[in-house]
């Protein structure tokens, strides 16, 4: 199923709010970013897909410097946080944004998100793995291609 989600990318506002009625739109405070999202696999409903997409956009905001890392770090493992910090340094001064997102559920309690990210010069691939833990959904794997053959990785 394919949907278009309107996702907040305002750095000073809450990441989530309840979905509005009608279609695949989630209304969040502040300016919104229209992201094309594709949902596949069993066990992924629209609300869960929006949640995963919103958290992934928040990670992209952190990488691009538009959002503070403290807003997402409690939802990440230590190794994923380290990679996020390295990516933020690598993209310092660039306004990057997610242009499309694909969410799939390969297993119960696991969401895999792939995103196409525009950095002003070229598109890059971002992969995020979210697992359900006692604290909620936690990013335990984060990968992004920086250059041909150079991928920043984190795995718990």
Image: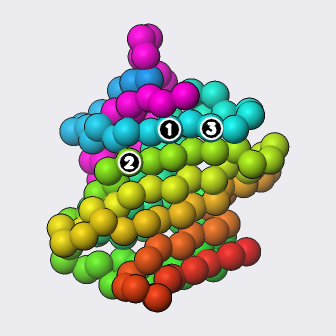
Q: What stretch is highlighted in magenta?
A: 1-23
Q: Is residue 91 visible?
A: yes
| Quadrant of the rendering where the N terminus is positioned | top right
The residue carrying mark 3 is 40
Q: Residue 82 location in percent, x, y? A: 54, 81
How far apart are labels 1 and 3 at the CA level?
Answer: 7 Å
- Report the disc number at residue 100: 2
In screen coordinates, is 58 left or right of 97? right
In screen coordinates, is 12 left or right of 79? left
Let me know if residue 3 is in the magenta part.
yes
User: With respect to residue 147, does 132 lie above or below?
Assistant: above
The residue carrying mark 1 is 38
Q: Residue 125 location in percent, x, y? A: 43, 66
How far apart are labels 1 and 2 at the CA level?
Answer: 8 Å
Q: In which quarter of the image is residue 98?
A: bottom left
Identify the secondary structure beneath mark 1.
Answer: strand
Residue extending farthest to the top is: 21
| Magenta stretch: dominant secondary structure | loop
User: With respect to residue 148, does 101 lie above or below?
Assistant: above
Let me know if residue 111 is in the magenta part.
no
Crowding at label 2, few (<14), some or many (≥20) Cα neighbours within 10 Å?
some
Image marks 1 and 3: residues in contact by CB distance under 8 Å = yes
User: With respect to residue 155, does 15 lie above or below?
Assistant: above
Image marks 1 and 2: residues in contact by CB distance under 8 Å = yes
């Amino acid at each position: 199923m394919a949907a278009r989600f309107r996702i907040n990318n305002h750095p000073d506002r809450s990441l989530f709010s309840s979905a509005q009625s009608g279609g695949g739109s989630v209304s969040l405070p502040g300016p919104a970013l229209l992201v094309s999202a594709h949902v596949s696999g069993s066990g992924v409903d629209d609300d869960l897909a929006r949640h995963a997409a919103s958290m992934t956009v928040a990670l992209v905001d952190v990488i691009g410097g538009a959002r503070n890392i403290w807003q997402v770090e409690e939802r990440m493992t230590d190794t994923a946080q380290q990679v996020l910090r390295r990516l933020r340094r690598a993209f310092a001064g660039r306004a990057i944004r997610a242009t499309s997102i694909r969410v799939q559920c390969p297993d119960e309690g696991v969401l895999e998100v792939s995103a196409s990210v525009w950095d002003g010069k070229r598109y890059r691939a971002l992969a995020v793995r979210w697992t359900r833990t006692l604290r909620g959904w936690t990013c335990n794997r984060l990968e992004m291609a920086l250059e041909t053959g150079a991928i920043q990785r984190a795995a718990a």
